[in-house]
Image: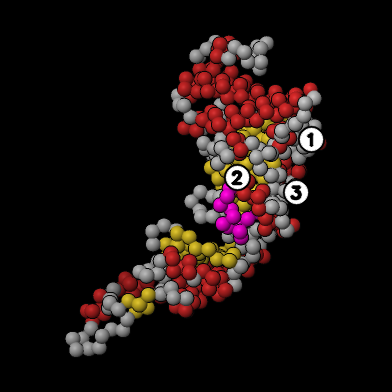
Amino acid sequence: MEAVTDYAPYALPIATVLVGACLLSTVLRYLRADRGTRISMRQAVRVRWGWVRLARMAGLTVTDKTPTLLAQITAQKDGATPAPRVLTPKIKVKPDPYGVIVRARTLPQVGLEEYQKSARFLADAWRCTRVSVLPDGPGRVVIRGVRSDPLTTPATHRPTSRPPTDLTRWELGVDEYAAQVSVSLANVPGVTVAGVPGAGKTSGVNKFVCDFAPSAAVQIVTADGKVSRASEGDYADLVKRMFAFCGDDLDEANALFKRLVELRKRRSSVIRDVLGVKNMWHVGPSPEWPLTVLIIDEAHTYFREYKGSDPTTKRLAALTAENARLVEDLVKKGRSVGILVILISQKTTGDAIPTFIRDVCPIGLSFAQKTVEAAVAALGEDIRNWPDASPVTLQDPAYVGVAVMAMQGRPGYTRIRTPYVSDADAARVAEDTSHLTADPDLCLDTLLRSTGRTGNARAVAHQVFPNSPQLKGG
């Protein structure tokens, strides 16, 4: 006791210093924050202070009639029964530029469903545009309240030129609650991207290229059907990071698709011997066996049906039919050997992208559309049941860069604000990473030689595919 008494005079100064340090830290965070975050920080204070009263009015409390252990011990035999206790869930509040994130506990009779029923009331009380409630593990929920709409707030992305930590994740942007949205590319054979001109399709794909360009384990090839040369189109700044490029010439595109099909066949024939697995995704991409991404922009250029009896029309019809067959091969057979196809078109109807290609692609994004039929072609028949999320509602200029997609594990459809990457940043990333560009065919040759399984990889390929035009001439 004497020792405790000796330290008693220091307790108040120490407590004062700690409280002062906390207040100073809070003030510094407030001063360093941007305008939106400052508003959210003030909002977070109101949420904390008003939670007990708000929870009672919203029906998010429970009455416990069982006395506590202390009340049972101290209660007199003939005394009054202890009054019931009103239990209020405990919360933690975190502000961000768009609003607040509230993590709350559940109670008996106050679970996820009760929080979701009170979401509209919480939105009004917290002055939020919308509020969502999702599970956050056993006995917990996360309440997301956004004060400003992330979908109508322009967003920009500045690439870092650093390799991504996870080559299986494609960071798309933020959803309507400002939560980061990403999709897994592992074991994905194809992606379709649809939307009217100027809605943000190519910009979204540009971000993909800029994010993955710093990795030598990713190699990109592009066919752009709206230009004749790379310098004329949207990929002029990125072409340095592509190992091949072709424009709207059907003969060039046909040769490119054949080249990639031959790569697919070569990989399929040696994957077990070289990688020791039958699926590349079991070990992941590497500079020796890179994920090969084929971007087909304005895909309808290469697949459209030509009708006519003159020789020129017949030749073009044969080319587009063969293009469809070749791309079908890549989408249906390229997944396990590390080939991903991204098809971009204004409408992904059957006349633009053949259904035997489109329907095999598990990931579909749609930017603004003019008709419900176009939205159905891009996202599936179920989009009719979710009219509020339909891309038809995104025709306002404020929604340029906003896409809709079905997310695994989420009901319905998710709207995503994709950030804009400036041309200057795209050019910088392509210039900085151009030395990483490599032909996957040559990478495979090097890998086969390094494994010592063959002295001449091309000779082995000739034995497997003796009629391959891509291998003739060594």
Residue 7 visible to the viewer: yes
Q: Secondary structure at mark 2?
A: strand
Range of magenta residues: 380-391
Image vertical order of residue 110 relative to residue 424, above or below: below
Q: Main secondary structure of the magenta part?
A: helix
- Is residue 33 in view from this perspective? no
- Work out how far the residue at label 2 is from the one at label 1, CA to CA, in angstroms: 24 Å
Whether the magenta-drawn stretch holds residue 354 is answered as: no
Q: Is residue 103 or residue 184 the one in the foreground?
A: 184
- SS for tag 3? loop
Count of labels in the image? 3
The residue carrying pointer 2 sits among few (fewer than 14), some (14 to 19) or many (20 or more) residues within 10 Å by Cα, namely many
Q: Position of residue 4 (x, y in %)?
A: 33, 72
The tag on residue 198 is 3
Tell me which colouring the rendered structure shows: secondary structure
Report crowding for label 3: few under 14, some 14 to 19, many 20 or more residues within 10 A (C-alpha). some
Q: CA distance from mark 2 to mark 3?
A: 18 Å
Q: Earlier in the sequence, mark 3 or mark 1?
A: 3
Q: Are marks 2 and 3 in contact (CB under 8 Å)?
A: no
Q: Residue at x 56, y 22 (%)?
A: 265
Residue 391 position in % (x across, y down): 65, 54
What residue is pinned by disc 2? 364
Which quadrant would residue 28 be assigned to in this image?
bottom right
Q: Which residue is mark 1?
A: 227
Asked where in the image residue 23 lies, by quadrant, the reply is: bottom right
User: In what quadrant of the picture does the C terminus appear?
Assistant: top right
| x then y, percent, for residue 136 | 44, 58
